[in-house]
Amino acid sequence: MPTGIDLPMPDADALAHSTRVRSHIAEVIRAEGGRIPFARYMELCLYAPGLGYYSAGSRKFGEGGDFVTAPELSSLFSRCLARQCEQILGTLGGGEILEFGAGSGVMAADILTELAARDRLPQRYFILEPSPYLQQVQRDTLRARQAGWFDRVAWLQQMPSPGFRGVVLANEVLDAMPVHRFAWRDGEVLQSFVVEDDGFSEQFDRCEDENLRDAVTRLVKEFPDIESGYVSDMNTMALPWVTALGDCVDAAVVMLIDYGYSRRDYYQAERRRGTLMCHYRHRAHADPFVWPGLQDITAHVDFTTVAEAGLAADMSVAGYTTQALFLIANGLDDMVAQSDPDQVRAHLTLTAEVKKLTLPTEMGDRFKVMALSKAYDAPLTGFGLRDFTDRL
Ligand SMILES: C[S@@+](CC[C@H](N)C(=O)[O-])C[C@H]1O[C@@H](n2cnc3c(N)ncnc32)[C@H](O)[C@@H]1O
């Protein structure tokens, strides 16, 4: 049991799995000279083939898993998103949807169901999911709906070829990308490396990653109140990911939904330990070395940097708002109004879901929605109530 953190004990099979993950990471560390960058450690914990948290077969999402995402919480989320897709596909005169990191597949199923009901199905619904285990879960979820749209769904192994037209969706995908941890100490950028000792631990040493060093150097110039000893995290994979997306879309809107902040809020001087969080059985804590492979490791999203990556990739920022305002602007209120209060149990469930999706203390404010667009100029319904792009 890790010290100082109150977590439920995994069963014997889970612990045996974590031991295999640990041995694999230890082998990599030895093979790579005795230490690996933190981002590499996080990548192995989450995505090592057959072993990592997302690659191996255990329940992750929902009540029986480790955390709940908005589409797992309620179909209302996906139905509102479907309405945004409907507007975009209508304006483009058709097109396709591409969802990154589709989790259990429930968001795809609910979006397709809503679009079918509104007679606006996309030509194809593509899913790009790196985990073969989750691809199978998604297939099972979508097939179980026994709906006419199933043959429109296809799984991609890589980014689509240039020429994509339509909507790109990524809910809680940027937060699942491996991040670097860095420290700013005595005027120098240090990088976190993971070493093997009793288990694993991190050591900060001179930064070897050029992109990270340059980005942190720019950061401390931009925010001079960052003091020596400051530690935070940085997703250096988001930029190449957005660039690659920009290259393959022709006319499209990319909808990114995640918990995160503007760069100013992310790297505020008071947030001296960064945003890295781990989730195990609905407990959140900040120790990434607990039971490798059994817990999710995640970091918030710096939406200012994502927006800049979009601009550099020839896209525009078409909107940035909170999840609550986005959902309400896409018809959440109407959906609630259609619920019959005499169906007491169903109505109470729906009301509880709305609260979780929209209250500032729940997901409403912490989660943001950003749209990047290319060759698409119409105002998007989801940002009709408030657009906070000017705060980025
Ligand atoms: C936190 S889960 C979110 C799942 C789902 N979108 C949801 O909201 O329930 C992160 C998902 O992103 C996937 N993922 C991580 N990096 C990715 C990448 N570069 N491209 C596509 N999917 C990715 C993971 O495998 C996983 O399915």
Image: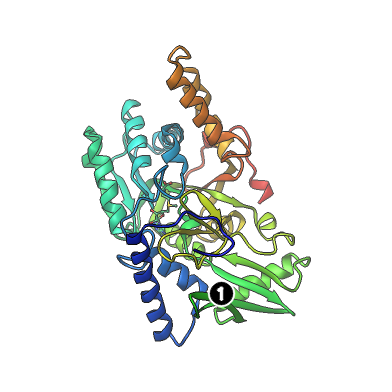
Q: Amino acid at mark 1?
A: Asn
Residue at (47% x, 67% y) in the render: 42
- Residue 325: x, y in percent? 59, 34
Residue 338 or residue 13, whichever sits in front: 13
Q: Is residue 81 left or right of residue 189?
A: left
Q: Establish if 17 lies above or below 335.
A: below
Residue at (32% x, 32% y) in the render: 113
Residue 329 appears in the figure: no
Residue 284 or residue 71, whichever sits in front: 284
Residue at (52% x, 51% y) in the render: 283
Q: Is residue 147 left or right of residue 251?
A: left
- Residue 326: x, y in percent? 55, 36
Q: Is residue 143 left or right of residue 3?
A: left
Quadrant in the rendering for residue 33: bottom left
Q: Establish if 221 lies above or below 147.
A: below
Q: Establish if 108 lies above or below 19.
A: above
